[in-house]
Amino acid sequence: MSASFVLLGLLSSGPKHGYELKRAYDRSLPNAKPLAFGQVYSTIGRLERDGLVERAGQDRDGGPDRVTYELTELGRQTLDEWLGTVEPPAPYVSSVLLAKVVVALLTAEPERAGSYLADQRAAHTTRLRELTRSKHDPTANIGDVITADFTIAHLDADLRWLRTTLDRVAELHQETQP
């Protein structure tokens, strides 16, 4: 995920300073990779350099100076283009889960792979239940719910893959046993 485009999207509703952007990011994408304050400010600096945002004001409010930023017309156009571009399906599989299973199988230890898969399946199931409950939390906003839906769909796909892989590992184990 590109922090630049998320910050442009957050600024599309109006000017904000760095702290407000960080809070809005955390609120809007609660299950995403955390965005550090330093990353917010360095990203805003690049967006400003590229003419996508500009300073809209500055206030002090009892603490250090806070610079407020807003989208420029170019920033709005860039955001619209990004939102209008279809994301191609990922060409490569990048998953620690897959890597661990493959490595366990490469070490000729199907029992180890089977044990790892069973443990991972239990962890996925626990997380799936947590997310399902979180969707019914009265304080959950639409961002929380759709993020939970997205994560649940991916966990569900992982669980189907884990089940299929457990079956394949069990078959392999039976074939290797005399």
Image: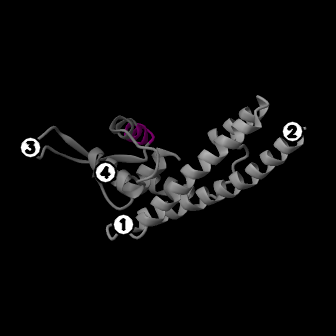
Of the residues under marks 4 and 1, which one precedes in the sequence? Answer: 4
Element under label 3?
loop
Which mark lies nearer to you, 2 or 1?
A: 2
Instruction: Please give the label number shown on residue 62.
Output: 3
Residue placed furthest toward the left = 62
Element under label 2?
loop
The residue nearer to you, when weighing 171 against 65, is 171
Q: Amino acid at mark 4?
A: Arg
**3D distance between C-alphas at marks 2 and 4:** 56 Å
Instruction: Please give the label number shown on residue 23.
Output: 4
**3D distance between C-alphas at marks 4 and 1:** 16 Å
For the C terminus, which image quadrant?
Answer: top right
**Residue labelled with disc 2:** 177
Q: Are marks 3 and 2 in contact (CB under 8 Å)?
A: no
Of the residues under marks 3 and 2, which one precedes in the sequence? Answer: 3
Q: Residue at x 33, y 47 (%)?
A: 22
Which mark lies nearer to you, 2 or 4?
A: 2
Asked whether residue 94 appears in the rendered view, the answer is no
Q: Are marks 2 and 4 in contact (CB under 8 Å)?
A: no
User: Residue 63's x, y, as percent?
Assistant: 12, 40
Of the residues under marks 3 and 1, which one precedes in the sequence? Answer: 3
Number of other residues with Cα within 10 Å of mark 1, as a class: few under 14, some 14 to 19, many 20 or more: few
Q: Amino acid at mark 3?
A: Gly
Number of other residues with Cα within 10 Å of mark 4, as a class: few under 14, some 14 to 19, many 20 or more: few
**Left or right of 139 on screen, residue 78:** right
Element under label 1?
loop
**Residue labelled with disc 1:** 140
Q: Amino acid at mark 2?
A: Gln
Which mark lies nearer to you, 3 or 2?
A: 2
Q: Residue at x 47, y 60 (%)?
A: 131
Of the residues under marks 4 and 3, which one precedes in the sequence? Answer: 4
Q: Residue at x 39, y 37 (%)?
A: 39
